[in-house]
Amino acid sequence: AAAAAKLEPRALAAHEGAPLGAEPLPSRCLLLLGAEGPGLPEDADALPALTIEGAPGAESLNVAVAFAVAAHTWQGGSR
């Protein structure tokens, strides 16, 4: 369905993804966020992953906060 809608999926991962904001997100991006605890399903491992860089030792962000940061970045940050 995402391909039919011409959406480009990206997984927002707690670790081991490209830094969010290092490159612009596609204008028709489908951003996948995992549930708190279990995270993303295994089949999301094949998708390009993005990570929000945080303080050393921080495990991850609350999923709502992570989406807010990603949405802000997607829309070009502060203008």
Image (tube, helix red, strand yellow):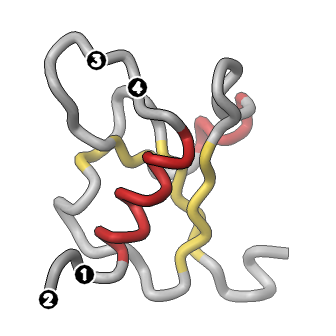
Instruction: Looking at the image, tell me whether mark 1 or mark 3 is earlier in sequence order.
Output: 3
Instruction: Looking at the image, tell me whether mark 3 or mark 2 is earlier in sequence order.
Output: 3
Q: CA distance from mark 1 to mark 2?
A: 7 Å
What amino acid is labelled 4 in the image? Ser
What amino acid is labelled 3 in the image? Ala
Question: Is residue 42 shown above or below 78?
Answer: above
In what quadrant of the picture does the N terminus appear?
bottom right
Residue 35 on image: x %, y %: 70, 34
What amino acid is labelled 1 in the image? Gly
Helix, strand or loop status at disc 2: loop
Label 3 belongs to which residue? 58
Residue 45 on image: x %, y %: 59, 36
Q: CA distance from mark 1 to mark 3?
A: 25 Å
Label 1 belongs to which residue? 76
Instruction: Looking at the image, tell me whether mark 4 or mark 2 is earlier in sequence order.
Output: 4
The reply to whether dot 1 and dot 2 touch (C-beta < 8 Å) is: yes
Label 4 belongs to which residue? 60
- From the viewer's perspective, tell me whether residue 21 is left or right of residue 48: left
Q: CA distance from mark 4 to mark 2?
A: 27 Å
The reply to whether dot 4 and dot 3 touch (C-beta < 8 Å) is: yes
What amino acid is labelled 2 in the image? Arg
Question: Is residue 24 shown above or below 28?
Answer: above
Number of numbered callouts drawn: 4
Label 2 belongs to which residue? 79
Q: CA distance from mark 4 to mark 1?
A: 23 Å
